[in-house]
Amino acid sequence: MDIDVRGPRSGAAVTTVVLAVVLVTGSAWLLAWQTLAFALGAAGGVGRSPYGWLFRTFVRPRLGPPTEFEAPAPPRFAQAVGFVFAAVGLAGFTLGAEWLGLAATGAALAAAFLNAAFGYCLGCEMYLVVRRVTVRTQ
């Protein structure tokens, strides 16, 4: 079943704010929260993430009905990519490699910002590339 495109974009806006705060404060705890949010979105789909719940509960009821839909697999893959970057960033911050924490968190922030501000989901595009490559090699 396809999903409302506004949900992942709304989640990306929250993610952008969270990751920006992580970069400013260096908070490993806040990055741990974001890592968990990515993990839940990757495991259960974006609708099962905490930000998906916020969208369903508080944002969508105030909007008109959706006019655009997308397949759930690309945003779910994007959540998995975000999880990897956040986990690497978390490892960097907690193990004393602050440069790694900053770089990985910055990369995740850049991708989240692109989705929130412009509707361009880098992880979704990666998903499509991976699908094309794997279909051609079979």
Image (tube, rainbow, N blue to C red):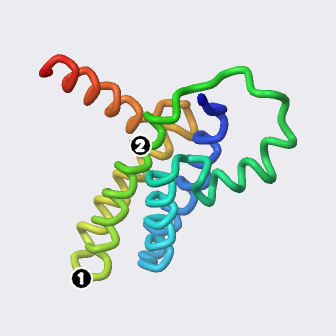
Q: As drawn, which residue projects farthest toward the top?
A: 136
Taking the spot 51% from the left edge, 62% from the top edge, the residue there is: 37
Question: Mark 1 packing: few (<14 Cα in 10 Å), some, or many (20+)?
Answer: few
Report which residue position mark 2 lands on. Answer: 78
Residue 20 in view of the camera: no
Residue 46 in the image: x percent, y percent? 55, 47
Number of numbered tags placed on the structure image: 2
Q: Is residue 21 above or below residue 129?
A: below
Residue under the image location 47 percent in, 67 percent down:
36
Neighbours of disc 2 within 10 Å: few (<14), some (14-19), many (20+): many
Quadrant (top left/top right/bottom left/bottom right) for the C terminus: top left
Q: Depth check: give the residue in front, 45 or 83.
A: 45
Q: Quadrant of residue 127?
A: top left
Going from the N terminus, do you reach mark 2 or mark 1 first? 2
Q: Given the current orientation, which residue lies at the most extreme left position?
A: 137
Q: Do we see residue 92 in this rendering?
A: yes
Q: Amino acid at mark 2?
A: Ala
Dot 2: element: helix
Q: Nearer the viewer, residue 61 or 18?
A: 61
Against 49, residue 94 (above or below) is below
Q: Quadrant of residue 26?
A: bottom left
Q: Quadrant of residue 95?
A: bottom left
In the rendered view, tell whether residue 101 sits above or below residue 14: below
- Nearest the eye: 127 or 114: 127
Q: Which residue is mark 1?
A: 96
